[in-house]
Image: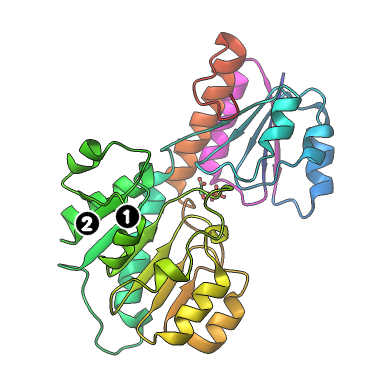
Amino acid sequence: MKVLVATQKPFAKEAVDKIREIVEQAGYEFSLLEKYEDKAALIDAVKDANALIVRSDKVTREVLDAAPELKIVVRAGAGYDNIDLEAASEKGVVVMNTPGQNSNAVAELALGLMVYAARGFFNGKPGTELKGKTLGIHAYGHVGRLVAKIAKDGFGMIVSAYDPFIPAEKIEADGVKVYDNVEELYANNRYVSLHIPANEHTIKSINYDLLSKMPKGATLVNTARKEVINEDDLLKVMRERDDFKYVSDIAPDNGELLLEKYNERCYFTPKKMGAQTAEANINAGIAAANQIVNFFKNGDTTFQVNK
Ligand code: 3PG
């Protein structure tokens, strides 16, 4: 049984060591492909793999076709928009994620981006504080919930959320106000933090209609996916409103243009950094390795996302 870890953006060394340990203790072979330059390297590496651990690496139909022995792919992380679920299901390959394992790292970065924006990207001029400001959490999953907690308990922000998939009582139990209408979330919050996945329902869904509703001094924080933003609409809002800021862990496709025109109001991390901490790597890596062992030894499919 061969378990391949294929990560263009490598895990911290401690995470790789722990994954290797779990895999070898189970009696399986461990194989590592890091920092590969092109998909040909991945295609070559998967040819005899029975299990695959990836991060944002693209597991396309072509990759799956090249892996006849593959039984399971675990995305060590939350979002699985990088994996062709349809192709995997057709081939009988189980796909899992490791929900919650890297959430704290992403949540901390979301708050870091908020502070950075509030302080004018450290330009030396007086900025503003987060205390007492309104923050809307768009999607209250693992990351959204942690952002709400840190913002409320740590920074003294006034936090509300919109998530049609989570019962209002559950969110309210955290002391967070619930909006059952997404427009109201945007209209009532100076900060909005995005935590929606990228899928057919959400791609380009953050549009002019929503963004233009945000109050004066608005900041949109995106540690989710660049694909959920309607970039033309974002550009329009940035052009029309000199009070609007956009901070993101993922540069948009029109990022250069935005930075060229509005560099005092937008910031993008040079590389996607949200889950890039030793702790998140270790948590997600260990979970991925354990899920694979549990799948092969006990048939456990708890975290399967292509059921
Ligand atoms: C996730 O979906 O878990 C995050 O976006 C992290 O992605 P990464 O593993 O590529 O850093």
Question: Can residue 241 be seen from the camera position used here?
Answer: yes
* Picture coordinates of residue 136, whole percent (x, y): 29, 59
Q: Is mark 2 within 8 Å of ligand 1?
A: no
Question: Which label is found at residue 2?
Answer: none
Q: Which residue is mark 2?
A: 159
Three-letter amino acid code at the position of disc 2? Val
Separation of marks 2 and 1 at Cα, in angstroms: 7 Å
Name the one closer to the observer, 257 or 181: 181
Q: Is residue 259 magenta?
A: no
N-terminal label among 2 and 1: 1
Disc 2 residue crowd, few under 14, some 14–19, many 20+, Cα 10 Å:
many
Answer left or right for 185 relative to 172: right
Tell me which residue sits at (31%, 88%) in the image. Answer: 124
* Picture coordinates of residue 149, whole percent (x, y): 23, 49
* Picture coordinates of residue 289, whole percent (x, y): 56, 27
> Does 141 sit above or below residue 159?
above
> Does 8 sit above or below residue 247?
above
Q: Quadrant of the N terminus?
A: top right
The span shown in magenta is 8-34
Answer left or right for 244 relative to 236: left
* Picture coordinates of residue 246, whole percent (x, y): 43, 73
Disc 1 residue crowd, few under 14, some 14–19, many 20+, Cα 10 Å:
many
Q: Secondary structure at mark 1?
A: strand
> Does 284 sit above or below residue 8?
above
Q: Quadrant of the C terminus?
A: top right
Q: Is residue 17 magenta?
A: yes
Tell me which residue sits at (41%, 38%) in the image. Answer: 100
Q: Secondary structure at mark 2?
A: strand
Q: Which residue is mark 1?
A: 137
